[in-house]
Image: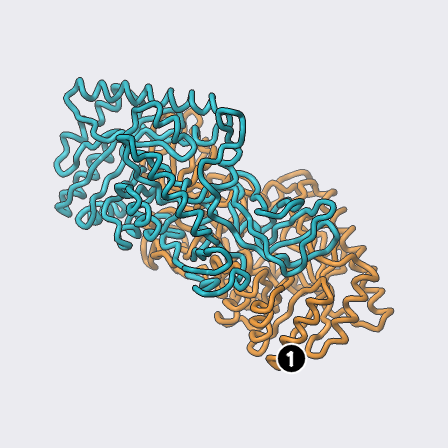
Chain colours: A cyan, B orange
Amino acid sequence: MTQPAPAEAGMAIDEIDTPALVVDLAAYERNLARMAERLADTNVRLRPHAKTHKSPIIGLDQIAHGAIGVCCQKVGEAEVMVEGGVRDVMVSNQVVGPRKIARLAALARHARVSVCVDDAGNVADLGAAAEAFASEIDVLVEIEVGMGRCGVPAGEPAVRLAKVVDATERLNFAGLQAYHGAAQHIRGHGDRRAAVDSAAALTRETVGLLAAAGLDCAVKAGGGTGSLEFDLEAGVLNELQAGSYVFMDADYGRNLDAGGEHWQPFENSLFVRATVISAPTPTRRVTDAGLKALAFDSGLPLVDGLDGVTYQGPSDEHGTLALADGATLALGEAVMLIPGHCDPTVNLYDWYVGVRGDVVERVWPVAARGRLA
Amino acid sequence: MTQPAPAEAGMAIDEIDTPALVVDLAAYERNLARMAERLADTNVRLRPHAKTHKSPIIGLDQIAHGAIGVCCQKVGEAEVMVEGGVRDVMVSNQVVGPRKIARLAALARHARVSVCVDDAGNVADLGAAAEAFASEIDVLVEIEVGMGRCGVPAGEPAVRLAKVVDATERLNFAGLQAYHGAAQHIRGHGDRRAAVDSAAALTRETVGLLAAAGLDCAVKAGGGTGSLEFDLEAGVLNELQAGSYVFMDADYGRNLDAGGEHWQPFENSLFVRATVISAPTPTRRVTDAGLKALAFDSGLPLVDGLDGVTYQGPSDEHGTLALADGATLALGEAVMLIPGHCDPTVNLYDWYVGVRGDVVERVWPVAARGRLA
């Protein structure tokens, strides 16, 4: 159910009702610009992952900064993106079942739509639906490059499936999806590079086999924020699916760069604003942001800009903070928390509250929040 | 944002779009009846926790089975309950900040409203708001009984705060809130009893001190599904706040009973229905239910009714299943997952799909989904 917005434009930041999802607009805009600069002199396109933000408004900002379109994980997310004005959407996932496949094929009449496959029967189902709607769908064959999730094995099995796609009316074989999600969060710089290089080698080999079979692999898609520099070095992917770079999260800050320092090429622009609702002891504070206000799968949130204050742990609706010697935080005061993992945190909210300095400038919907299907 | 409902009444269960939150209505109704039976010959009232289900429809079902009202954790949840016809709502939490306090005091004109406090300044703020709205609010003093979260210490500090409440116009000192949330999930039967007994002793002592100070402690509130039998034995609490009993979850099944067996006095009635979207190897299946479809803070979900199939782990939108030798599960087939923790799982969905046998009978909103503030 859509919940009341926690703020409106023109309010002071202190007037935001909490818990609320707050975007530092200046930092967000710098992240958009930084990614555009990074890719400017490459032949690599950006198709950022909208599963991070679930907002066509942000998708259109990314496109204004050079992205060619967006990725989604669900048909429902793709529908929301197209409703919001995005004209080129890839579902970087398998779409299974007659209702969802029909929705995808219908959507393909109103936007450029691509999807991933790892099963020949699924290819037939997609082709039949595209035929029924007289639409065309670009299809990428997903290969398994180290993540242990979906995808056919790289090499000949991928070529066999690409031939099936190529032989199906109204489906266009567009290329390979080669996403190594697990590589994004490998802490060590060298280990992260090795995982990416291994995925790149499998992809390169498969592209060669496709060419030998007369199939043009126009799109080599994959990558994420954590593997960006290595994906560019490896030089195999030509369409990157980074999503987290717009917001960043606490977990990405735990990755290490080449010098062993915390890796932070983009800025934290996403925060959960929470209020202290109890101050029961000198060293304990309890906030209104717990398991329903933050995702904890990738560790605890960080407390922004307050020395000596750490988030100790959540219960359903509470988050407990520990105060070190000398730290102060009064009942009713607000804290800004950097989520451990931005994607599932965003999915808990209906509204982004965009602030510039201490003023609320824009409140906009997390339009695909909860769009699971 | 409110999402499209995944089913409608009359559909076959196989037609439900996934992922979806499914309630086995017969099991749910047996849970309601079982709790009513259990409390029938006691002097203990039930005020179930609506943070579990976030649905006034379920709250009214509970009231029809003898509950005196519901609890909530947030003012917004309380508003949704009152909008949905519940006339007696306790916010079993601290309410801090002028906007939220004003909403609480306004709501108290339209329903019986109670709230918990652990700070004298907060009591003054509540009193001023009740004065402004010419409403009356019942106030419970929350005591710390072992959870290490909110609450004043049991004993004299609680009496001092109760006196402040009692002296405040338009606030009625109603009793004590003595919730030991951590006790709910202590695995060992004896250890769980010891935690509850310790909380009960602190509560009993404080009730005695209140009486000595001339303050009637009408309500002794607390307890949960996991501590139900011990709360009843201890005989101190007269208002129980169990919530999970309507649904149960995988984690409660990990508690042990007196015989060392898995403790399951209520039935699992809540499921996440998911679909297999990839079958990349003979022993791996990938479903469409990951971190945005299930809560993982209390462990992995269980796969209902399928031998040899286990949920191995989530990523944002995927859940990987492992198949043991001989187990089969085809692409496109659905599985029913028992969530590790029902409360934050429910909060991810807009709709309950109620089924009886293999037929969808009722689809109703998770009306307070995302009502964080």
Residue drawn at x 65%, y 46% is: A309
Up-down relation of residue B37 to residue B329 (above or below): below
Horizontal and vertical percent position of residue B200: 77, 55
Horizontal and vertical percent position of residue B274: 39, 43
- At label 1, the amino acid type is Glu
Tag 1 secondary structure? helix
Graded by Cα atoms within 10 Å as few (under 14), some (14 to 19) or many (20 or more), the crowding at tag 1 reads some
Quadrant including the N terminus of chain B: bottom left
Question: How many numbered badges does the structure rendering display?
Answer: 1
Residue drawn at x 67%, y 44% is: A308
The quadrant holding residue A162 is top left
Taking the image as drawn, is residue A118 in sight?
A: no
Q: Which residue in the rendered view is the most extreme toward the right?
A: B212
Up-down relation of residue B322 to residue A67 (above or below): above
The quadrant holding residue B121 is bottom right
Q: Nearer the viewer, residue A335 or B335?
A: A335
Taking the image as drawn, is residue A134 in sight?
A: yes
Horizontal and vertical percent position of residue B348: 45, 51
The quadrant holding residue B3 is bottom left
Horizontal and vertical percent position of residue A112: 20, 44
Q: Nearer the viewer, residue A120 or B159?
A: B159
Q: Chain of mark 1?
A: B
Drawn side of residue B51 relative to residue B239, left or right: left
Q: Nearer the viewer, residue B14 or B70?
A: B70
Q: Which residue is mark 1?
A: B131
Drawn side of residue A114 relative to residue B308, left or right: left
Q: Which residue in the rendered view is the most extreme toward the bottom?
A: B134
Up-down relation of residue B250 to residue B69 (above or below): above
